[in-house]
């Protein structure tokens, strides 16, 4: 295998990875957002809001890791007490966009998992990532298709 074909194999592998894994990631986010769209609305009261630096937005929204750990972007997390659909009072936390709107004692609208009332999130963050991922996902898929095309052309060239 000559060096051009070796480079073609690398491009082919990268292209297929872009074309397969990115649609999978986008599809799982869409399914997750649709599932969260069926969560039950509930009311709560903020107990406190904090700023965190985390490894990722997902880690901070789910509360993984110690508060303030990591070196990623700063996110704001509201801690709240809410009334679940079965009438029980539960604690929750979730990422919010504007911490000034969520001072201690202020009301907060949340959505609750219908199958596990202990899982909740602020209503404002229930489905945000899907729209943000659509355009970059399509662009990266196109890049993957181009890489796959040129990689295949380099691998299977007869010259």
Image (spheres, rainbow, N blue to C red):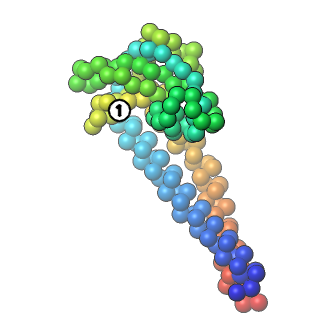
Q: Which residue is mark 1?
A: 119
Quadrant occupied by the N terminus: bottom right
On-image quarter of the C terminus: bottom right
86 displayed left or right of 28: left
Residue at 46% from the left image edge and 28% from the top image edge? 94
> Furthest-bottom residue in view?
158
At a point 37% along the width and 42% down the height, the residue shown is: 35
* Along the line of sight, the residue nearer the viewer: 73 or 71: 71
Local packing at callout 1 (Cα closer than 10 Å; few below 14, some 14-19, many 20+) is some
Determine the residue located farthest toward the top in the rendered image: 105
In the rendered structure, the answer to whether residue 38 lies left or right of residue 16 reads left
User: Which residue is nearer to you in this view: 142 or 51?
Assistant: 51
Give the percent coordinates (x, y) of residue 93: 43, 26
Q: Position of residue 72 (x, y in %)?
A: 63, 37
Q: Residue at x 57, y 48 (%)?
A: 134
Residue 55, by quadrant, is: top right
- Percent coordinates x, y for residue 51 in the rendering: 58, 23
Q: Considering only vertical position in the picture, is 112 above or below 145?
A: above
Residue 150 picture quarter: bottom right
Q: Is residue 147 above or below residue 28?
A: below
Is residue 128 something that shows in the picture?
Answer: no
Instruction: Please state if 8 lies on the left or on the right of 58 as rendered.
Output: right
- Residue 107 shows in the view: yes
Residue at horizontal 39%, vertical 37%? 37
Q: Is residue 33 above or below residue 6?
A: above
The image shows a total of numbered marks equal to 1
Q: Secondary structure at mark 1?
A: loop
Horizontally, residue 149 falls left or right of residue 126, namely right
- Image vertical order of residue 78 relative to residue 53, above or below: above
Q: Percent x, y for residue 158?
A: 72, 90
Nearest the viewer among 62 and 101 is: 62
């Amino acid at each position: 295998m000559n060096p051009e074909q070796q480079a073609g194999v690398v491009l082919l592998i990268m292209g297929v990875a872009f074309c397969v894994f990115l649609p999978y990631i986008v599809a799982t986010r869409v399914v997750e957002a649709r599932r969260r769209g069926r969560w039950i609305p509930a009311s709560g009261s903020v107990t406190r809001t904090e700023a965190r630096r985390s490894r990722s937005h997902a880690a901070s929204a789910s509360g993984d890791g110690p508060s303030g750990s990591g070196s990623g972007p700063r996110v704001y997390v509201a801690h709240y007490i809410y009334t679940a659909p079965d009438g029980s009072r539960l604690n929750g936390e979730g990422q919010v966009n504007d911490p000034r709107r969520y001072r201690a004692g202020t009301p907060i609208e949340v959505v609750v998992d219908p199958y596990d009332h202990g899982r909740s999130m602020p209503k404002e963050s229930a489905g945000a990532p899907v729209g943000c991922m659509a355009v970059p996902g399509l662009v990266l898929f196109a890049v993957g298709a181009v890489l796959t095309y040129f990689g295949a052309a380099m691998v299977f060239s007869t010259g």
